[in-house]
Amino acid sequence: MADLFACVKVLGSKDFVTYALEQLEQHQIVKREGNLWKVGTADLHIPKESLMIGMHHSNWKQRAVTDSLMPASGGVHYTAVYSLSRSDYQHLKEKMIDLIAHTRKIIGPSKEEELICFSCDIFAV
């Protein structure tokens, strides 16, 4: 994990950063190893019932739009509107749920080398 104390000038004090890290440690987001802070083991997921879920999705969708405007980013952006049968819609929805489950199995043991946003939507209009 990057040197988190480098942001002290922005946040105000080393005590504030230490307090924030200790809060993150309580939720297993980070862990302390001697004088170093490392990524923890917590699998973070905001439940769909959360009052913050809409804002969470909105923030990352906006980042996707920004990334889509930079052709050299290497990101994959795809948007389509289809007219199809209800059963095909259900089939696509199930496939997407399977893909999401598959990705969660991959990211669990994966090393923290790259921060990515994986976002997908399927809904009736």
Image (cartoon, rainbow, N blue to C red):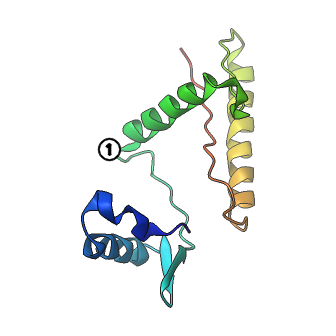
Q: Residue 58 vs residue 106: left or right?
A: left
Picture residue at 62% right of the left edge, 52% below the top: 115
Local SS, label 1: loop
Decide if residue 19 is on the left or right side of residue 32.
Answer: left
Whether residue 68 is situated above or below residue 125 in the rendered picture: below
Q: Quadrant of residue 13?
A: bottom left
Which amino acid type is shown beneath numbered disc 1?
Leu
Write the residue at 38% across / 38% down.
55
Q: Nearer the viewer, residue 48 or 55?
A: 55
Point out residue 44 in the picture as x, y percentages from the top left corner: 51, 60
Of residues 92 and 21, which is closer to you in this image? 21
Residue that mark 1 sits on: 51
Residue 35 in the image: state x and y as whole percent.
48, 87
What residue is drawn where x is 69% and y is 60%? 113
Q: Residue at x 69, y 11 (%)?
A: 82
**x, y percentage for residue 85?**
72, 14
Q: Is residue 77 above or below residue 9?
A: above
Q: Is residue 80 left or right of residue 16?
A: right
Residue 16 at what x, y percent from top left?
26, 70
Q: Residues within 10 Å of mark 1 (few under 14, many from 20)?
A: few
Task: Determine whether 8 is above or below 115 in the image.
Answer: below
Tell me the quarter of the picture where residue 76 sits. top right
- Residue 2, image quadrant: bottom right
Assign the N terminus to one quadrant of the image: bottom right
